[in-house]
Image (tube, grey):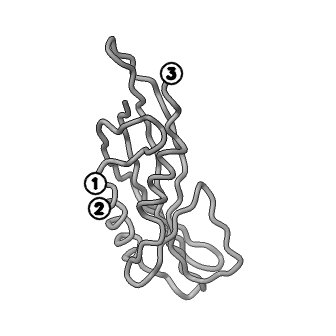
């Protein structure tokens, strides 16, 4: 296929659209696959993790079928704090609302033809030093 691989353009568009968003008084940053912190403080952020692409062959033109998994992560430090999923819910809702309009893949020569959103099961993990909640948004794009 002659068209550019859309991965980096999708990540840039998501980053530009959502990074620095304020939710419930907390600034939510977007990271590319990994976040590291030097503290055990409470935090909330979004990771852009798994991406995949398939070519959809068509007699008129080929399309990309592209997916990316966005992980909303909230961490509540301290063993006595059980935390709440409310912030994770609100961040996911803000992320969903920001993704309603098609992504802009400027500079790639690609255009989003359609996009769908899916919300897989969320996860709660009890850590030795806190509680970690994860919610997911899988964005599926058809790109021409």
Tag shown at residue 10: none
Q: Is residue 114 left or right of residue 136?
A: left
Circle 2 residues within 10 Å: few <14, some 14–19, many ≥20: few
- Marked residue nearer the N-terminal end (2 or 3): 3
Residue 135 lies, with reference to residue 13, above or below; the image says below
Asked which secondary structure carries label 1, the reply is: loop
Please name the residue that numbered disc 1 is placed on.
Answer: 100
- Marked residue nearer the N-terminal end (1 or 3): 3
Q: Nearer the viewer, mark 1 or mark 3?
A: 3
Q: Are marks 2 and 1 in contact (CB under 8 Å)?
A: yes
- Picture residue at 37% right of the left edge, 30% below the top: 144
- Picture residue at 36% right of the left edge, 70% below the top: 89
Please name the residue that numbered disc 3 is placed on.
Answer: 2
Please name the residue that numbered disc 2 is placed on.
Answer: 97
Residue 79 lies, with reference to residue 114, above or below; the image says below
Q: Is residue 35 left or right of residue 123?
A: right
Q: Is residue 143 left or right of residue 20?
A: left
Distance Cα–Cα, label 2 vs label 3: 33 Å
Asked which secondary structure carries label 3, the reply is: loop
Residue 95 lies, with reference to residue 102, above or below; the image says below
Dividing the picture into quadrants, the one containing residue 17 is bottom left
Specify the farthest residue to the bottom: 80
Dividing the picture into quadrants, the one containing residue 87 is bottom left
């Amino acid at each position: 296929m002659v068209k550019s691989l859309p991965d980096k353009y999708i990540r840039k568009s998501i980053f530009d659209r959502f990074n620095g968003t304020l939710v419930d008084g907390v600034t939510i940053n977007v990271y590319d696959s990994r976040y590291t912190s030097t503290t055990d403080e409470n935090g909330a952020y979004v990771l852009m993790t798994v991406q995949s692409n398939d070519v959809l062959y068509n007699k008129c033109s080929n399309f990309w079928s592209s997916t990316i998994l966005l992980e909303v992560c909230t961490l509540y430090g301290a063993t006595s704090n059980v935390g709440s999923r409310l912030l994770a819910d609100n961040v996911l809702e803000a992320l969903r609302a920001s993704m309603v309009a098609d992504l802009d893949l400027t500079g790639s020569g690609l255009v989003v033809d359609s996009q769908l959103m899916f919300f897989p099961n969320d996860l709660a993990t009890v850590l030795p030093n806190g509680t970690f909640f994860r919610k997911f948004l899988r964005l599926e794009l058809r790109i021409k």
